[in-house]
Image: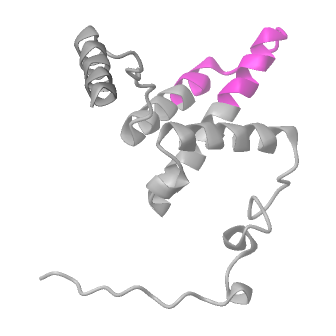
């Protein structure tokens, strides 16, 4: 039997969290650290790849944030490796695997855009323009 769901009335801002209201980036922690700035940058890039924030459900937005978090952690591990520091490669591989699966779930992949018209489309457009100019 289908559940009859209605849209709940929005709560006043004082009854919502600071994260929901946009006053804070995280429930606990600083939104101004280098880590947080990189995570926010990646999140914005991923949202753009998915067509913009207006195209995302709240659940997909959460998955995007998780993807950005995992990628930020992977980048930090890569930075430690570049400095010759020890990194748990098994943990790195697990995080990379989770990241890949989340990206696949979201459909994050760069799609080639066809911005060059075919010869036929170009010739048809020129012919239409000439016809319009002749009239």
Residue at (71, 44) in percent of width and height: 40
Q: What percent of the width, then of the height, locates residue 77?
A: 72, 23
Q: Which residues are magenta?
A: 73-94
Q: Is residue 67 left or right of residue 2?
A: right
Is residue 86 something one can see in this rendering? no
Q: Is residue 51 left or right of residue 122?
A: right
Residue at (63, 43) in percent of width and height: 43
Q: Is residue 97 magenta?
A: no
- Foreground pick, 76 / 42: 42
Q: Is residue 124 above or below residue 61?
A: above
Colour setup of the view: one colour
Q: Is residue 133 left or right of residue 91?
A: left
Residue at (55, 44) in percent of width and height: 47
| Quadrant location of the C terminus in the rendered image | top left
Q: What percent of the width, then of the height, locates residue 32?
A: 87, 49
Residue at (59, 27) in percent of width and height: 91
Dominant secondary structure (helix, strand or loop) of the stretch shown in magenta: helix
Q: Is residue 83 magenta?
A: yes
All told, the count of numbered labels is 0
- Foreground pick, 88 / 103: 103
- Foreground pick, 85 / 29: 29
Q: Quadrant of residue 20?
A: bottom right
- Foreground pick, 113 / 14: 113
Is residue 59 something one can see in this rendering? yes
Q: What percent of the width, then of the height, locates residue 86?
A: 77, 15
| Quadrant location of the N terminus in the rendered image | bottom left
Q: Is residue 127 above or below residue 53?
A: above
Q: Quadrant of residue 92?
A: top right
Q: Residue furthest front?
A: 135
Q: Is residue 61 above or below residue 106?
A: below
Q: What percent of the width, then of the height, locates residue 21?
A: 71, 73
Q: Residue furthest left?
A: 1
């Amino acid at each position: 039997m289908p559940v009859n769901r209605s849209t709940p009335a929005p709560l006043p801002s004082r009854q919502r969290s600071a994260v929901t209201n946009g006053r804070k980036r995280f429930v606990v922690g600083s939104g101004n650290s280098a880590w947080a700035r990189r995570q926010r940058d990646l999140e914005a890039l991923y949202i753009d790849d998915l067509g913009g924030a207006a195209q995302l459900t709240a659940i997909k937005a959460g998955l995007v944030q998780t993807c950005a978090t995992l990628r930020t952690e992977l980048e930090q591990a890569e930075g430690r490796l570049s400095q010759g520091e020890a990194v748990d490669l098994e943990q790195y591989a697990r995080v990379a695997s989770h990241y890949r699966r989340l990206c696949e779930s979201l459909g994050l992949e760069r799609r080639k855009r066809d911005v060059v018209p075919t010869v036929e489309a170009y010739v048809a457009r020129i012919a239409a323009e000439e016809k319009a100019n002749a009239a």
